[in-house]
Amino acid sequence: MNIFGTDGIRGKPFEFPLSPAILGQLGQLFSRLLAREMPRYPQGSRLNAVLFARDTRTSGPDLLEAVSRGFMENGWQAADLGILPTPALAYLVPACRASLGCVISASHNPPEYNGVKFFNAGGRKIPEQWERAIENWLQVEKAAARPSGRRRPIFLPPSFVPETARRRYLDFLRTQMAPDLDLRGLKIAVDGANGAAARLLPELLRSLGAEVVCRGAGSSGRNINVACGALHPSALSRLVCRTRCHIGFALDGDGDRLIVVDENGRPMAGEWLLATIALERRRLGEKGSGALVTTQVSNFALRRFLAGHGIGFVETKVGDRRVLDALEKEDLGFGGENSGHFIWPYLLPSADGMLAALIISQMVVRRGKKTSAAIACFPLTAQARLEAPSPAQRPPLENLPVFLKELGKVTEYLGSRGRSLVRYSGTEPVLRILLEGELPKARLNSMAKALKSAYLKAVE
C-alpha cells in the first residue's frame, strides 16, 4: 500500500488516503514506530509529545484532529500550534525536545487538496524506511491498531503554546541577520499565497527595518495558492513595479518555497539564485561552500556556470529531502531546487522560504546594488516542460510501449545536444515531462507535446 510520495501524503480531504479512519490509524502506527525508536534517545532527552501545525486550508482542523486522536489514544500528548509554516515545525520539534512533528498541508497544491508530512525528533522529514514500515503495517493490518497504553500523558510546558512557538521561530530567524546589517532603506513586496507564512514574513522583514507592501495575506481557507504566491508570480511582478519596490518575494502555501522578482518585476530563475548564493557563501569563506547540491531538473547552464567559478556540483533526484541527504553526506552548507526550495543544513534541516528571503535581502543590502545587478543572471539552456494527468493507478512507464516508442524517437533526436527526463510527480497526479537542449525552444515544445499525447493515448 503506497501512500507516501516525495513530500508526505497528498490527496483530497476525507478520501483515501486522507480519510479520518486512515489518518487515525496512521497516528496509532506512528505511535508504535516511535515506541521502537525512542530507546535510541538518552533517558529524558525527549518529551512524550507530538507537535502539530497546519496551513490555512479549511480541511486542516478536521484532518489534524483525526491524526492526533491516534496518538492520544496511545498515550501521547498532541500539541496544536495552529497555523505555522512547515519549516517552523522543523525548527520547533528539536527546539522543544518533542518526539515528532506533523504538518497538515498540501504545500503548493490547490486548496481542494491537503496532505500530511511528519518530522522526526531532529526536525528532519522522516526517512523513507519509516514510511515503508508504516505502509507495510497498513497493508498487513487493514483494521485499526489497538492502543498500546505504554506511555502516560504529561503536562506540556508553555513552549507548546501557539503564540510562544510563533515567537520562538521568528526569534530564530532574526538571529540569522548579520549583526552589522539591517534592512532599513529596502522596500520589499511580499505575496504570501494566502498561506501559512503570509503574515509572518512581512512581520519579520518589518522588524528588521524594511518597508513592506503585501498581497496574498487574506486567507479565506479556500484561496491558498489561487492566482497568487510562488506558482503565480505575475501578480507580485505587477505589485513590485506599481509600488517601486527593490525586490519581491512570493511564498507557497506552507512557506518552504520562495520565488524572487527583481526591481523590474522580472522573476529570477531558481538556478540564478542558487548560483548567486553559492558564490556569496564562498566569497565570505563560509563552511561547506566548495560545492552546491541541487537536483537533476536544474538547467544545464547552472553546472557550467559553477564550474567556471571553481564551485563543485552535486546532483540528486528530485525532492528537498534528497538534497538534504546529499548535503549532510558531503558536509556542504547550501543546496536546493530550482523550484524555490533553498536549504542551509547547518541552520535548519528543511527548506525555508522566510529564511531564504532574509538571506537574499541581506545579500542585496551588502552588495549595495539593484537586485537585477546583485543576482547572477547567466543565459539558460532552452527547456520545455509539460504535465500530463495520470490515472489513480499509475502504470510503470516501461509497460507503455506506445509511449516508450515516442520517447525513444525524442531521445535519439536529442542525442548529445540535450536530454529528456520523464517522471511521475511525487505530490500530484501527473506525469512530468522535461526536455532540454541546444535546440530552438519551439522544437523542444513540439517534442514534449508529442510525448504527452503518446502517454495519454497509452493510458486511456
Image: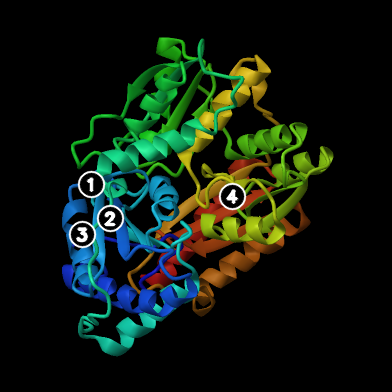
Residue 35 drawn above or below residue 320? below
Which of pointers 1 and 2 lies earlier in the amino acid sequence? Answer: 1
Which of pointers 3 and 2 lies earlier in the amino acid sequence? Answer: 3
Amino acid type, residue under disc 1 in the picture: Arg
Look at mark 3 in the image and give the residue it sits on.
63
Q: CA distance from mark 4 to mark 2?
A: 27 Å
- Sort mark 3 into few (<14), some (14-19) or many (20+) by Cα contacts within 10 Å: many
Look at mark 2 in the image and give the residue it sits on.
114
Give the quadrant of the N terminus. Answer: bottom left
- Secondary structure beneath label 3: helix
Residue 80 seen:
yes
- Sort mark 2 into few (<14), some (14-19) or many (20+) by Cα contacts within 10 Å: many
Circle nearer the viewer, 4 or 2: 4
Query: Would you say the residues marked 3 and 4 are in contact, meaning their CB atoms lie under 8 Å apart?
Result: no
- Secondary structure beneath label 2: strand
Look at mark 1 in the image and give the residue it sits on.
57
Which quadrant of the view contains residue 43?
A: bottom left
Q: CA distance from mark 3 to mark 4?
A: 30 Å
Which of pointers 3 and 4 lies earlier in the amino acid sequence? Answer: 3
Query: Would you say the residues marked 1 and 3 are in contact, meaning their CB atoms lie under 8 Å apart?
Result: no
